[in-house]
Image: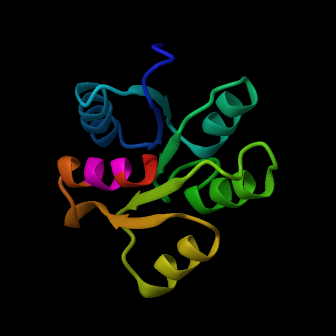
């Protein structure tokens, strides 16, 4: 992994979506760390992964995105990592909960192209 590049962790259980974003992030010149669920992502963080931003799905097995978000924001060493939720859930209550738990943004997958998501990511990496 190139330490001079920004690193994005993507936490997503849908392999198709994961592949799209891994490719887009790498093509945009950034490192990618992938995890299929919140538990796997926590393990990678505990093992020393240091992402500059986390792109996080909500609906996942073992530990969903909101549980992961809460755990990260409670950890002194991790709480300042910006987290952007990228999900299919679009109810007002879910959006409010995600933002309330500390997410920087809440993006509904069907409303954004990968390029538009990268624009948002870049905004939070400034």
Residue 54 part of the magenta segment: no
Residue at figure coordinates x 65%, y 53% from the top left: 68
User: x%, y% of residue 89?
Assistant: 39, 70
Q: Nearer the viewer, residue 64 or 3?
A: 3
Q: Is residue 57 left or right of residue 37?
A: left
User: x%, y% of residue 111?
Assistant: 21, 67
Q: Is residue 96 left or right of residue 117?
A: right
Task: Kindly report the secondary structure that dominates the magenta region of the rendered protein.
Answer: helix
Residue at figure coordinates x 26%, y 52% from the top left: 119
Residue at figure coordinates x 41%, y 82% from the top left: 91
Q: Is residue 21 left or right of residue 97?
A: left
Q: How is the image coloured?
A: rainbow
As drawn, 55 above or below 97: above
Quadrant position of residue 64: bottom right
Quadrant position of residue 8: top left
As drawn, 16 above or below 120: above
Q: Residue furthest top?
A: 1
Q: Nearer the viewer, residue 2 or 67?
A: 2
Please give the range of residues in magenta: 117-122
As drawn, 105 above or below 28: below
User: x%, y% of residue 18?
Assistant: 34, 37
Q: Residue furthest front?
A: 126
């Amino acid at each position: 992994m190139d330490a001079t590049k920004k690193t994005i962790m993507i936490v997503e259980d849908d392999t198709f979506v994961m592949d799209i974003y891994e490719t887009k992030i790498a093509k945009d010149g950034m490192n990618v760390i992938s995890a299929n669920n919140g538990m796997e992502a926590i393990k990678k963080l505990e093992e020393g992964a240091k992402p500059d931003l986390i792109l996080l799905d909500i609906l996942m097995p073992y530990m969903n995105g909101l549980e992961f978000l809460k755990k990260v924001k409670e950890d002194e060493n991790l709480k300042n990592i910006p987290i952007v939720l990228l999900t299919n859930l679009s109810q007002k209550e879910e959006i409010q909960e995600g933002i309330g738990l500390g997410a920087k943004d809440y993006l509904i997958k069907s409303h954004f192209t990968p390029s538009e998501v990268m624009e948002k990511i870049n905004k939070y990496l400034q």
